[in-house]
Image (cartoon, rainbow, N blue to C red):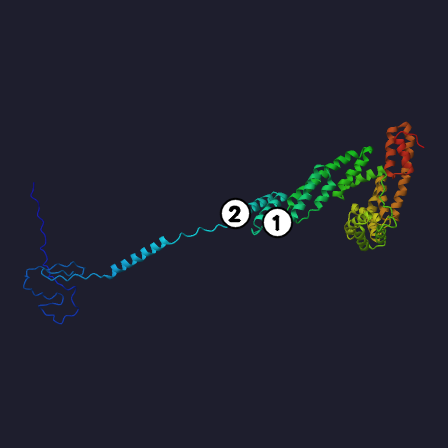
Amino acid sequence: PPPPRRVRRPPPKPTEPATTEPSMPAVNPDVTDQNPAHEPPPVEADADSTNEQPALARRPGRAPVARRLPGARTPPPKKRSVVVPLLLLVVLGLGGAFAYQKYLAPPPPAPKVDPHAAEVEAAKVAFQEGKNLVRKSQWKAAAAKFDEAYALAPEVEGLAQYVEAGKTEVPLADHLDTAAAALDKGEVAKASRELAAVPETTQQLTRRNELQSRLNKVADERLKKAKALANDRSKMRELKSLAEDVLAARPNDRDALNFLDIANRALGWRPPVEKPPDPGDPAAEVVSLWAGGDSTGAYAKAELCEAASPRCAKLKEQIARVQPMLKKLESLEEGELLDTVRLDKAIGGGQQSAGGKQAGVRLAAVLTPKASSASARKQWGAAMALSRKILEGDPGNAAAKNIISDGKLAAEELYKRCYVQRQSDPGEAIPLCKEVVEMLPDGDELRGKAERLIANKPAE
């Protein structure tokens, strides 16, 4: 193999003499050609040193490091301070003293437990249970929970308001429960009265609305039953009771009013007129005041004597019912106007007060067009029934009197046809006699004859 190739290395640079100074001054007054400014002055050799001592080469970019020359004297060691050990001893002593004092001190007392805290917590639980029951409209059970919580901790936030609300809502819940039970039995009037006792401001409005919808459904079912009863003359009392039950909830229901009118004609019903009270009865003064037009005085007198006289108590109730209706006659419907007229006569012992007369005039204005239309179509049963209602409120109404007079003539003609055909064609004769019965009120002589023909009895 060929011999290894030798690499020539550059000769080493001459080393600079060692110096004990970190840097040279910027200005040197002793600069000469022998001592340039960029070179340090030569160091005189001591007796123990030689000139062959090479100077340490400095790396470019680094400050020169002072090195101790051989034979130089070492500085004496620094003296240690006694302050730091003393401070440490003091800190340790204080820490030990503090720990000893803490060891000797009695143990801290146990934290105090409030005995009322458990009651407050139990009250909060009962309060929350009550609010959950309110969301389910179970106010009776909720009120019991609120009372329980209030007995434990009345200061619970918001509890007092619920307790007060319970005092209002629990009686209203009783009304709603009674209404629900009445609807289960099909008693529309009773359910309507109970629902009327629950205001719109109640917190049980959702349940009230549900019961109101259910009431309307039950009323519709009752009217379907009434339609079946209307064709059976032996069921007229039941029909009358059913129609009055529905009208208590829906006073302007046309079907119910029609069924009631059919039942009244069949039963020969007359508007109830209270007999005058005895002279010694304080109710006599109430009747006198009402008939004279002093409705306020009559009510005040009835309120004073209601404890001593049952008649006064009844008059007070009737006055309380009719007074609001007398104040809004223009907005009343047919059924409400007729009730107003009849109540006014019942309070006045058969006499009309000034307000009752106004209600009668308003009733005549509503019914006269209907009665005239029915008579023009020869629907004498409906025409005469409407005319009799008109005469209840307005006894001198000429139009109603004329319709009744024409209706009686038509009834006589129908009866004659019924009497003639009963031998040859009973199937055609009986409906004619039934129409006579529907046209005339109970107690009418011609009606009695038609009823005997229907019963296949000889006419007198």
Give how far apart the Cα atoms at labels 1 and 2 are. 21 Å
Name the kind of residue labelled 1 in the image.
Val
Mark 2 element type: helix
Residue 378 visible: no
Q: Disc 2 marks which amino acid?
A: Ala
Visible in this render: residue 385? yes
Q: Residues within 10 Å of mark 1 (few under 14, many from 20)?
A: many
Lateral position of residue 8 relative to residue 373, left or right: left
Q: Are marks 1 and 2 in contact (CB under 8 Å)?
A: no
Question: Dividing the picture into quarters, in which one does residue 264 lie?
Answer: top right
Q: Residue drawn at (86%, 44%), measured in percent from left and top?
A: 388
Residue nearest the viewer, comparing 212 with 398: 212
Q: Quadrant of residue 126?
A: top right
Location of residue 190 (image quadrant): top right
Total numbered labels placed on residues in the image: 2
Q: Quadrant where the C terminus lies?
A: top right
Numbered disc in front, either 1 or 2: 2
Residue behind mark 1:
163
- Across and down, in percent, residue 84 comes to 25, 60
Residue on which the image places disc 2: 118
Q: Position of residue 225 (x, y in %)?
A: 75, 35
Q: Give the residue furthest to the right.
A: 460
Q: Position of residue 320 (x, y in %)?
A: 78, 50
| Horizontal and vertical percent position of residue 253 | 76, 42
Q: Residue furthest bottom?
A: 29
Which element type, helix, strand or loop, lies under badge 1? helix
- On screen, residue 284 versus residue 78, left or right, reads right
- Work out whether residue 377 or residue 356 is closer to the camera in this orientation and state it: 356
